[in-house]
Image: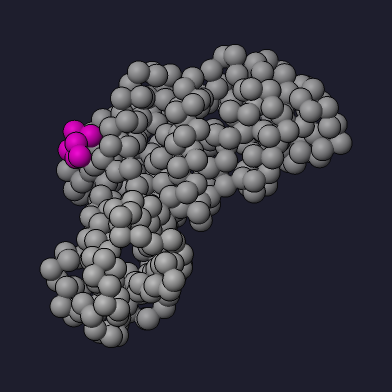
């Protein structure tokens, strides 16, 4: 990361530029799958006009973040870019405009830094997606363990079983080659949990294997937030609420800037009976990475549906904008069914049946993985009102 540039004479803004640079580097360093260049290696570029491609080559960084600060009449504009130093291509850029006062310097940093870090670095961020794309076309078994971790992020863009299978193959090879690699164990655990949670059923023992991999991840990398996230998710699907809560809070403590982890944990808190805490986390996650995937809205659906605010539930499901995912169509079908909007319910039910032909016999088992018994029966009630004949 290059030092943020400020060309004026305001000492407070100079201090802010330095503070933002330091805090963003610290935030990025919380993501174990990123190899972050220390501030001392890039500080020589402070106050200079720099060709990012040259700077990247000199400090050994493939990706570079640069930023500028400008002030006008009490307003601050911060421009930030993520650049591929090999090509000069801009992978992400955004301007932030804020009211500036010297008294609120730290509050401004606390507002801006997590949003920048998460948008760039979390699993749905611009940087992991670019890094994953660079190795996606290669044979999973020929990748280095680190490349296997990067490649596994591809699944979380598409949520397809074939992508999961390919990524899991690479990670299984990775942990054999490097048994103490926490990121590989954590990602292997997360993929196994996904296999179970989304009823891909690629392997009958996916949740058991996921739990074993998560425990191994925590054992070899106890300060790795992904390891604790994986452990939290396995506990959730094993219906061990206390274990889930402890592992989830540990993951959040280790890295509160991972919007993907915050969103996932928030949804699981909503579903495990602590809706207030879960919704707080779900809202925070959306702010951390405004470019988040649609499933971040599923917590809002379940919270509204739980409170029998079916209009808000349907609105949340529509915001998820995942028409090709059977789970979203199931949520819409149940919501429309409870609203009595039979035309919309039948439309979503047709799409649900297309995506999941055996829905009548499988939906209860699939939903039971996620929902506690009361919420499950309430959900099934909505599906039945929509016209789905469920074979228990």
Can the viewer see residue 153 in this picture? no
Which residue is painted at 64% across and 46% down in the image? Answer: 319
The quadrant where residue 215 appears: top left
What x and y, as percent, mark residue 259? 41, 46
What x and y, as percent, mark residue 263? 45, 40
Question: In the picture, which quadrant includes the N terminus?
Answer: bottom left
What x and y, as percent, mark residue 309? 69, 27
Which residue is painted at 44% across and 28% down in the image? Answer: 277
> Magenta stretch: residue 221 in it?
yes
Q: Does residue 121 appear left or right of residue 124 in this picture?
A: left
What x and y, as percent, mark residue 295? 55, 43
The quadrant where residue 127 appears: bottom left
Q: Does residue 123 appear left or right of residue 303 in this picture?
A: left
Depth check, front residue: 99 or 344: 99
Which residue is painted at 26% across and 40% down in the image? Answer: 254
Can the viewer see residue 290 in this picture? yes
The quadrant where residue 249 appears: top left
Q: Eyeballing the image, is 199 above or below 74?
A: above
Depth check, front residue: 82 or 209: 82
Q: Eyeballing the image, is 256 above or below 247?
A: below
Q: Which residues are magenta?
A: 218-223
Q: Eyeballing the image, is 277 above or below 124?
A: above
> Magenta stretch: residue 344 in it?
no
Question: In the picture, which quadrant includes the C terminus?
Answer: top right
Q: Does residue 318 appear left or right of residue 154 in this picture?
A: right
Judged from this view, the residue extending furthest toward the right is 343
Q: Does residue 253 appear left or right of residue 349 in this picture?
A: left
Judged from this view, the residue extending furthest toward the left is 40
Q: Eyeballing the image, is 131 above or below 122?
A: below
């Amino acid at each position: 990361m290059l030092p943020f540039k400020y060309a004026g004479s305001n000492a407070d803004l100079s201090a802010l530029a330095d503070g933002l640079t330091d805090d963003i580097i610290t935030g990025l360093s919380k993501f174990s799958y990123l190899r972050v260049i220390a501030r001392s290696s890039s500080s020589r570029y402070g106050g200079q006009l720099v060709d990012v491609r040259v700077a990247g080559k000199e400090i050994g960084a493939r990706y570079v973040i640069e930023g500028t600060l400008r002030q006008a009449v009490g307003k601050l504009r911060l421009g930030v870019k993520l650049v591929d130093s090999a090509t000069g291509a801009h992978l992400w850029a955004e301007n932030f405009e804020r009211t500036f006062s010297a008294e609120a310097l730290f509050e401004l940093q606390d507002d801006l830094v997590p949003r920048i870090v998460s948008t760039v670095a979390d699993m749905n961020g611009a940087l992991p997606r670019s890094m994953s794309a660079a190795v996606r076309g290669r044979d999973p078994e020929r990748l280095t363990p680190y490349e296997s971790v990067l490649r596994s992020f591809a699944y979380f863009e598409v949520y397809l079983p074939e992508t999961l299978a390919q990524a899991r193959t690479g990670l299984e090879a990775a942990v054999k080659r490097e048994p103490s690699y926490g990121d590989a164990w954590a990602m292997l655990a997360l993929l196994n949990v996904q296999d179970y949670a989304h009823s891909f059923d690629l392997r009958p023992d996916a949740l058991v294997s996921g739990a074993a991999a998560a425990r191994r991840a925590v054992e070899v990398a106890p300060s790795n937030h992904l390891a604790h996230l994986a452990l939290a998710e396995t506990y959730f699907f094993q219906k061990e609420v206390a274990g889930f809560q402890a592992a989830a809070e540990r993951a959040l403590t280790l890295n509160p800037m991972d919007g993907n982890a915050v969103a996932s944990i928030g949804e699981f808190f909503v579903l495990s009976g602590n809706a207030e805490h879960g919704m707080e986390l779900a809202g925070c996650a959306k702010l951390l990475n405004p470019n988040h995937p649609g499933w971040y809205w599923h917590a809002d659906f379940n919270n509204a549906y739980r409170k029998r605010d079916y209009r808000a539930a349907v609105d949340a499901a529509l915001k998820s904008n995942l028409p090709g995912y059977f789970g979203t169509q199931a949520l819409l079908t149940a919501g429309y069914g409870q609203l009595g909007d039979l035309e919309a319910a039948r439309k979503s039910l047709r799409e649900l049946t297309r995506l999941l032909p055996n829905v009548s016999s499988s939906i209860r088992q699939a939903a039971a993985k996620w929902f506690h018994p009361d919420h499950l029966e309430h959900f099934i009630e909505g599906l039945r009102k929509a016209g789905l004949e469920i074979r228990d």
